[in-house]
Image: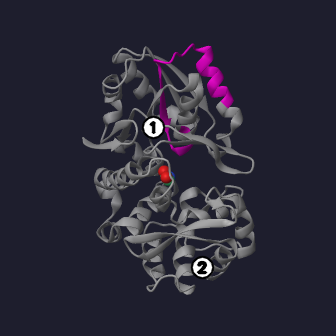
């Protein structure tokens, strides 16, 4: 089992291994004295992994209760959040009890926000079961729900007590859901590490899942340790996300987050180069690696449609927007600019 230590305001471990879900009760007991563990999961993951988790928690001495919601981004709203809070109260969870999020990013974000706010904060553990949640959303304490105006618009920074990554759970993912996580994985290569990028390009990440997840978690650790509350360099993790979120929004969220981020990385790389913001055009490198992992690299939405949709993005601040500009593979920079320049970059980046 691999172990990565996160040293934010609250320190915790990310444990990564094959088959460790069945040992999760014991691992959780090392960080929690809760009597009751409330499992939060969606209806798909419930059928796959909740029994293993529940049995393991029980054998470690926890009482368990379980909240199951319909899978998908459509559930990540104030109604499910409210139902979750009521569920915790009905089951009389106390401040010394625990929420365990079992599932992908939607589950982790919502369960984390519930943990952050129920009784003004109770402990929670993340057990991500998608690649995207393993390499990104389960680590770093961003918790949220969506509002009608956009994604993740209500939330809190609230760190888990432990993250347990069982890479065996990736075997049940649909290929397109695995590819989604690869978009965020590739993002780390573009942001921080040419060698990692080349490794992903020349090898198959599926053959080295523990190492790949560990590497990504280390990049995430370094970023959130330096900027837990996302006031500076944590913003780099949004590479491809401004255009990406706009694509997701334009599609009514039928285009997945990973696919949208993949296209968003191409748009910003090409747009930055054509706008003279960087010397080197790395668009072909990005397209090559995305295609290898069956990710899309273009969209039919126009610059006008995407620009309008980007208006509610959290990265907009007083008429300005912060973009992440890839200078070369393995090095990016934050670039705060006017909205009209963003429109230009977007337009140039589309083709
Ligand atoms: N998912 C980006 C971040 O955690 O900051």
SS class, disc 2: helix
Q: To which residue does mark 2 refer?
A: 349
- Give the left or right position of residue 324, taking residue 70 as reference: left
Q: Which residues are magenta?
A: 82-107
Query: Is 160 covered by the magenta stretch?
Result: no
How far across and how far down the image is residue 303, in percent? 70, 75
Classify mark 1: residues with Cα within 10 Å, few (<14), some (14-19) or many (20+): many
How many badges with numbers are in the image?
2
Query: Can residue 348 be seen in the rendering of this structure?
Result: yes
Q: What x and y, as percent, mark residue 9?
A: 40, 39
Badge 2 density bin: few <14, some 14–19, many ≥20, Cα 10 Å: many
Between 93 and 286, the residue placed more toward the observer is 93
**Residue located at (33% from left, 22% from top):** 29
- Tell me residue 314's x, y (percent): 63, 55
> Which corner quadrant of the image does residue 28 belong to?
top left
Q: Is residue 349 above or below residue 168?
A: below
- Which mark identifies residue 159? 1
Quadrant of the frame with the N terminus: top left
Q: Residue furthest front?
A: 318
Distance from label 1 to label 2 (Cα)?
36 Å
Q: Which of the two marks, 1 or 2, is nearer to us in this view?
A: 1
């Amino acid at each position: 089992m691999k172990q990565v230590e996160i040293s934010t305001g609250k320190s915790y471990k990310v444990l990564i291994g094959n088959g460790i879900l069945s040992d999760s009760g014991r691992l959780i007991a090392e960080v929690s004295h809760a009597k009751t563990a409330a499992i939060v999961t969606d209806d798909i993951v419930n059928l796959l992994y909740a029994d293993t988790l529940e049995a393991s928690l029980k054998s470690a001495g926890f009482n368990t209760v379980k909240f199951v919601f319909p899978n998908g981004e459509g559930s990540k709203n104030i109604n499910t959040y409210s139902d979750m809070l009521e569920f915790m109260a009905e089951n009389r969870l106390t401040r010394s009890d625990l929420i365990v999020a079992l599932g992908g990013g939607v589950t982790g974000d919502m369960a984390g926000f519930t943990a952050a706010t129920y009784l003004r904060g109770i402990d929670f553990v993340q057990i991500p079961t998608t690649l995207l949640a393993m390499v990104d959303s389960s680590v770093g304490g961003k918790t949220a729900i969506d509002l009608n105006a956009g994604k993740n618009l209500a939330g809190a920074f609230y760190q888990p007590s432990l993250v347990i990554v069982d890479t065996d759970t990736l075997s049940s993912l649909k290929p397109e859901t695995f590819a989604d996580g690869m978009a965020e994985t590739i993002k780390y290569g573009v942001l921080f590490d040419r060698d990692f990028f080349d490794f992903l390009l020349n090898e198959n990440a599926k053959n080295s899942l523990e190492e790949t997840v560990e590497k990504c978690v280390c990049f995430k650790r370094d970023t959130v340790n330096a900027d837990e509350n996302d006031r500076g360099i944590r913003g780099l993790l949004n590479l491809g996300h401004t255009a990406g979120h706009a694509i997701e929004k334009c599609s009514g969220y039928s285009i997945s987050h990973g696919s949208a981020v993949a296209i968003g990385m191409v748009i910003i790389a090409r747009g930055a180069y054509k706008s003279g913001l960087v010397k080197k055009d790395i668009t072909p490198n990005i397209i090559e690696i995305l295609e290898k992992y069956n990710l899309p690299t273009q969209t039919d939405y126009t610059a006008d449609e995407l620009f309008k949709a980007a208006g509610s993005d959290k990265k907009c601040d007083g008429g300005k927007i912060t973009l992440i500009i890839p200078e070369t593979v393995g090095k990016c920079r934050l670039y705060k600019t006017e909205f009209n320049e963003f429109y230009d970059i977007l337009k140039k980046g589309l083709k």
